Image (tube, rainbow, N blue to C red):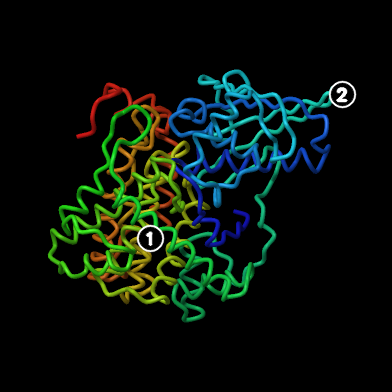
């Protein structure tokens, strides 16, 4: 396969929920389309923009906020910095005025009810997450571009052979787990050290350290918000948030002024198995309840699976004395490389591979990262990733109501616990005797994805999505 360089900041993207492929990806595609308009023809005289959504984007786009994300992207807003509390106001203004201010500069007529079309029965061959943008000028000129949201916030324009950044030359090019192991053996470096050397092709080491510190800080803030926010999730399923109530049951109703004070209170409770298990679940619930509420999260490697890695990393920090900058750096670097290998060898898009491509991949990423950080070898880390994915194979994506809520939120708790278990198993095992390699399980995951019926690939056409009446409270 052609080599595809993927940076840690490609796998871990800061953005807004609830979906990396249905929210963040379309948002980015809209931004890039407007940049294309500006560069090729300019915005002057532009009087109309229309959007057509296909396949999975059409079928679950409303529940995932695809239409919202596209309108904000066309308006020139950025998901990294946009105030999540202003979403309703911004979208309400567009709807009321029937106007978009393209890139924040050019007013165009726009009615979201008629200018965004959902083609539920039509899917484009390259990828189920497809969208076409159409722009018209007063003088009759037109421009059309089709974009694909291919998972994890990655987007690709039709006709482009490669994605942005693919020309970067890495000292240790990696497409497979075997490639990664080769470089580890040849250099004697750990997985995270190999990744750090590769990151130098994009930026100086200090910049990478700052980038990862920002990623972790965003994850921490998301956990904290989720553990202290009550109420009902949006979307009409009447799903109550649970993380805040669980947080109170575990440490009482006392409030803490900052994140560190709260963490110290958790640590003071000891490390009883049930107590630890409850906290891992609480951390994962917190992140994905924030994600479901259009909160700020980090793709890890997707939004729907955004709670697994923060939960396992927070577990490592609190219950394994992992509060060391270099350990946190190693965790995120290792996780990113495992995620990139899955993207290259299979997919991280639920619309292509079901939930095994999201929760399964995130669990494998977390398992490998945790194993390295607690002293496991490179081969044990890869074995942990294999174990985690092996026990997610075939997991379907069947969100009720097209919302990233049921079963998505609870699945993050299961993915986190499986990651910890996979790590423990690998640490107590000898990789020499392993029967299944990481590359073999990635290949199996991809063949399983290809065999999986489309109704189990983020279409809400099968599984739980058709068994559970809308409006039923979550168990």
Q: Residue lying farthest right?
A: 139
Figure quadrant of the C terminus: top left
Query: Which residue shows up at 47% across the image and 38% down it?
Result: 352
Circle nearer the N terminus (1, 2): 2
Q: Name the residue under label 2.
A: 139
Query: Which residue shows up at 73% across the image and 43% down it?
Result: 35
Please state which of residues 124 and 110 is positioned toward the viewer in this rendering.
110
Q: Which mark is residue 272?
A: none
Indicate the position of residue 440 as horizontal and vertical percent values: 40, 54
Q: Is residue 74 left or right of residue 68?
A: right
Tag 2, which secondary structure? loop
Q: Do the residues labelled 1 and 2 touch (CB within 8 Å)?
A: no
Indicate the position of residue 335 as horizontal and vertical percent values: 42, 62
Please state which of residues 246 and 4 is positioned toward the viewer in this rendering.
246
Assess disc 2: are there few (<14), some (14-19) or many (≥20) residues with their C-alpha within 10 Å of its C-alpha: few
Up-down: is 439 above or below 135?
A: below
Please state which of residues 211 and 248 is positioned toward the viewer in this rendering.
248
Indicate the position of residue 326 as horizontal and vertical percent values: 42, 77
Q: Which mark is residue 220?
A: 1
Assess disc 1: are there few (<14), some (14-19) or many (≥20) residues with their C-alpha within 10 Å of its C-alpha: many
């Amino acid at each position: 396969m052609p080599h595809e360089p993927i940076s840690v900041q490609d796998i871990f993207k800061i953005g807004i929920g609830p979906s990396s492929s249905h929210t963040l990806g379309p948002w980015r595609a809209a931004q890039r389309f407007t940049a294309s308009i500006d560069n090729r023809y300019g915005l002057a005289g532009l009087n109309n923009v229309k959007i057509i959504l296909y396949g999975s984007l059409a079928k679950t786009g409303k529940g995932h906020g695809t239409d919202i994300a596209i309108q904000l992207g066309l308006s020139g807003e950025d998901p990294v910095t946009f105030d999540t509390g202003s979403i309703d106001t911004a979208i309400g203004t567009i709807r009321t005025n029937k106007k978009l201010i393209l890139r924040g500069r050019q007013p165009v007529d726009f009615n979201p009810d008629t200018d965004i079309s959902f083609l539920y029965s039509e899917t484009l061959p390259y990828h189920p997450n497809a969208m076409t943008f159409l722009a018209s000028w007063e003088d009759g000129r037109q421009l059309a571009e089709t974009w694909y949201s291919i998972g994890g916030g990655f987007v690709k324009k039709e006709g482009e052979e490669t994605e942005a950044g693919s020309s970067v030359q890495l000292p240790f090019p990696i497409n497979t787990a075997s490639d990664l192991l080769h470089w580890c053996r040849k250099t004697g470096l750990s997985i995270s050290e190999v990744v750090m050397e590769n990151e130098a092709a994009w930026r100086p080491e200090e910049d990478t350290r700052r980038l990862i510190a920002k990623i972790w800080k965003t994850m921490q803030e998301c956990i904290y918000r989720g553990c202290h926010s009550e109420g009902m999730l949006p979307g009409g399923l009447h799903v109550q948030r649970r993380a805040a109530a669980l947080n109170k049951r575990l440490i009482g109703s006392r409030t803490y002024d900052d994140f560190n004070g709260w963490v110290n209170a958790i640590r003071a409770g000891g490390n009883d198995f049930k107590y630890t298990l409850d906290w891992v679940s609480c951390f994962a619930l917190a992140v994905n309840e924030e994600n479901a509420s259009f909160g700020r999260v980090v793709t890890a490697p997707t939004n729907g699976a955004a709670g697994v890695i923060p939960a396992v990393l927070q577990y490592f920090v609190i219950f394994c004395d992992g509060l060391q900058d270099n350990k946190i750096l190693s965790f995120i670097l290792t996780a990113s490389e495992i995620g990139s290998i899955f993207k290259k060898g299979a997919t991280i898009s639920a619309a292509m591979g079901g939930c095994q491509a999201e929760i399964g991949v995130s669990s494998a990423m977390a398992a490998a990262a945790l194993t390295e950080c607690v002293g496991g070898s490179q081969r044990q880390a890869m074995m942990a990733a294999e174990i985690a994915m092996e026990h997610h194979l075939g997991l379907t994506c069947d969100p009720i109501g097209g919302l990233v809520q049921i079963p998505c939120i609870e699945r993050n708790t299961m993915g986190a616990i499986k990651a910890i278990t996979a790590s423990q198993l690998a640490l107590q095992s000898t990789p020499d005797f392993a029967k299944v390699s990481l590359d073999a399980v990635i290949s199996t995951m991809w063949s399983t994805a290809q065999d999986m019926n489309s109704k189990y690939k983020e279409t809400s056409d099968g599984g739980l999505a058709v068994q559970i009446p809308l409006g039923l409270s979550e168990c």
